[in-house]
Structure formats: structure tokens, C-alpha cells
Image: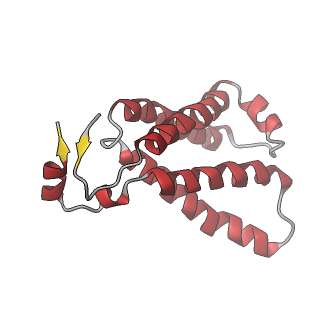
Amino acid sequence: MNQVSEDINVRWGWLKFMYIFTIVLAGGNGLGIIFFPNLIASMYKMPKQDPIVFGVMGGVYLAFAILSILGLRSPLKFVPVLLLQLFYKVIWFVGVILPLLFSGPFPTYGIPFVVIFALFVIGDLIAIPFSYVFAKQQDRYVAVAA
């Protein structure tokens, strides 16, 4: 495991857990969307999806899972994967979910997405070592020993 200076707090267990969580949930959904799109849509009771857009979503989820496999090997090097995941989910909450909540009845098929995405946001906020992410570049070279 990488040695990190004492002033940078890394929750190694949480970090690896979030990579595993991403591999299982995002990877599973990504594979399902790409190879069994009708099954995934019916599982979530979603309205019919455009196959191109739905496929892009599956590809992105699968890419997150593959990069998270690499994150298990080098947790700090692949923290940007978790950051991207955190930011796009927060943007989704603000730009999609909040307007839907204020515009009328919320679609029931959206509830599993809200719950799962909220778990990812909370987990990423706990796992991401923000002190490492925002450390000056020269401090990082000193902080992390090969």
C-alpha cells in the first residue's frame, strides 16, 4: 500500500469499497444495458428508451467499472474516476431530480436511481481523500512514496 504523509488522510477501506461498489453496481448495470437492454428497462419499470442513448449510458457505466478495477490496484491514482462519478451524480440530482420533484408527481421508476445514486454520492464523499486531491502538485510527490 502506498505510504501517505500524516497530513493527508486516506480512508483506504472506504476507497476500495467504493471501487468495488462501482464495479458491482455500475458494471452490472452497464453489462445489462448493453447486452440485455429490455430486461434492464423492465426491471426498473422504465419507459421505452432510445437504444443509442441507453447504450451510451451502459457504456459509461461499464467504463466506470473497468476503471474501478484498476482503482483497486492503485487507489489514489484512480481517484479521478470517483470524482467524476461524484460530480455527474450531484449534477444529475440538481439538474434533473430537483426540477422533477418541483414539477409534479415524481415517476416511481426513478426512485431506485435516486436511492442508488445517493448511496454513491455519500460513499464517494467519505472515500475521496480531498486533502490529497487538493494538495499542491509538489506536495503530492513528497506525500506519496513509490
- In the rendered view, would you say 69 is above or below 136? above
Q: Quadrant of residue 70?
A: top left
Give 145 or 65, whichever is nearer the viewer: 145
Most extreme residue toward the top is 35
- In the rendered view, would you say 113 is above or below 131? above
For this view, does 2 lie left or right of residue 34?
A: left
Residue 35 rendering spot, x and y as whole percentages = 65, 24
> On the rendered image, what quadrant is the C terminus found in?
top left
Residue 66 rendering spot, x and y as whole percentages = 45, 30
Q: Quadrant of residue 139?
A: bottom left
For the point 63% across and 51% down, the residue is 119
For the point 77% across and 75% down, the residue is 102
For this view, does 66 lie left or right of residue 114?
A: left
For the point 42% across and 35% down, the residue is 67
- In the rendered view, would you say 19 is above or below 142? above
Give 7 or 68, whichever is nearer the viewer: 7
